[in-house]
Image: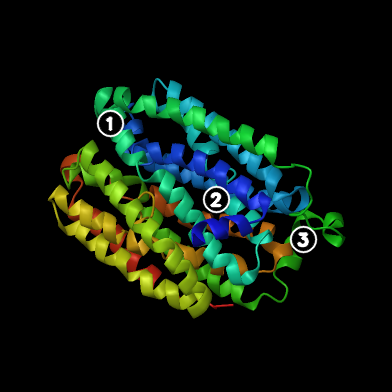
Amino acid sequence: MRFFDFWKRLDSRVKVTLAAIGVQNWGQQLTVQYNQLYAIDLGATAVQLGFLNSITAAIGAGVSIPVGWATEKYSAKRMLLLGLLFALVSSIIFSTAGAWWWLIPAFLVGSQLIRIGPLTDIIFFSSTEPGQRASLMGFSRVVWGGLNIFAPIFAAFLVATFGGINARGIRPLYFVQVGLTLFALSFLWKFLEVGDSSNRVEGSFKKAGLMKSYRDFFEGEKWLKRFMILRIIMQFGTNLAMPFVPLWMVSYNGANEYFLGVMGTVSVITALILQIPAGRLSDRLGRKKTYFILRPFCYLGTFLLVFTRNPGYLIIVGILGAIAMAGAGGVGGVGFTPFITMFWEMVPQEKRGRWFGVEGLMGVATIPARGFRRDTLGEGFGDDCYVGTCSFGGFVGFTNSFHDP
């Protein structure tokens, strides 16, 4: 009953965005465990994959500043529609790719050019009172998680039906993804008023240039520089391992499509159960304290992933969560709820577009992590490579400290 009462109290802009992004996100969940495997089967090597991730990160970071500026000037809604359009183009390219290099533009526009998640959160925060924001973050993840519960299993069934873990078996997932993204884009276009100025900053900002607006952004924000350094350290460790986690689970843990599917489903269900309690705890206890309660579970899951070869243990990893694991579910992944709430509350509403841009620029520091790895895979894809990357990302991330506004 409380679930439906909370839904009724939401702003109409939140409801429309929540529904549309939920559909689009379900489509993304279908392929999140298979993108790297798909590229490898189309002929990409591990080195090429790392290099492609580095280039993708560089371009995404390069455009983040103007994208953040445009978000405040033209509204988060317009940029969200543009982001969905790019996601649609990316899915179309994936569905028709005949060789791995076809995927280069898909990687570039699909996830880094205009990031959908932060734009969605900006709309949420601009339409919600401070005392309900963490609860809304948890609520939104429950809604999306409810939709995503069977996405990994459905993906596994489709992959197995069309040929297993290879390009032929994975390709149908992208056709489904195209249809869902097109629906989300059309739904937002029809029911969300693009011309609404609720997320734009009026007055002097409209007259300020790009660089001046960012100089003004940092005035009086003493906590931001400290946070940026810590955030870069965390991202470096995570991105060092992220492109290769699915390959690790298949090559080292011995997982097949069904193990990946069950692990993903268990991970989503665990997060689904805990999201709303975590949001409420964050609103009452504080964002930082709640984050530090939940985050250590990720490190337990990471070490289990690294040191066990039995694929059956992946179920426990799904429950706990793990560093750089697709979907960021499990108990540890729920820590994202207080974290993202704290992240957006570090600046006032009129600065959130530029804060979005700055956060994207911090990705520059993670570019070496995406390309830096030993030139080995399969026979040489040894313990030291993955243990070093995941442990670095986990422990360095755990030593950070935040200002709880």
* Mark number, residue 157: 1
| Element on which disc 2 rests | helix
**Few, some or many residues within 10 Å of mark 2 (<14, 14–19, 20+):** few
Q: Which residue is label 3 attached to?
A: 213
Q: Is residue 376 visible?
A: no
Pointer 3 with pointer 2, Cβ within 8 A = no
Q: Which residue is label 2 attached to?
A: 117
Residue 324 % position (x, y): 36, 54
Q: Earlier in the sequence, mark 1 or mark 3?
A: 1
Toward which corner of the image does residue 273 lie, by quadrant? bottom left
Q: Residue at x 33, y 35 (%)?
A: 154
Toward which corner of the image does residue 322 lie, by quadrant? bottom left
Most extreme residue toward the left is 310
* Mark number, residue 188: none
162 or 111, which is in the foreground? 162
Q: Quadrant of the C terminus?
A: bottom right
Q: Earlier in the sequence, mark 1 or mark 2?
A: 2
* Residue 207 vertical placement versus 220 (above, below): above
| Element on which disc 3 rests | helix
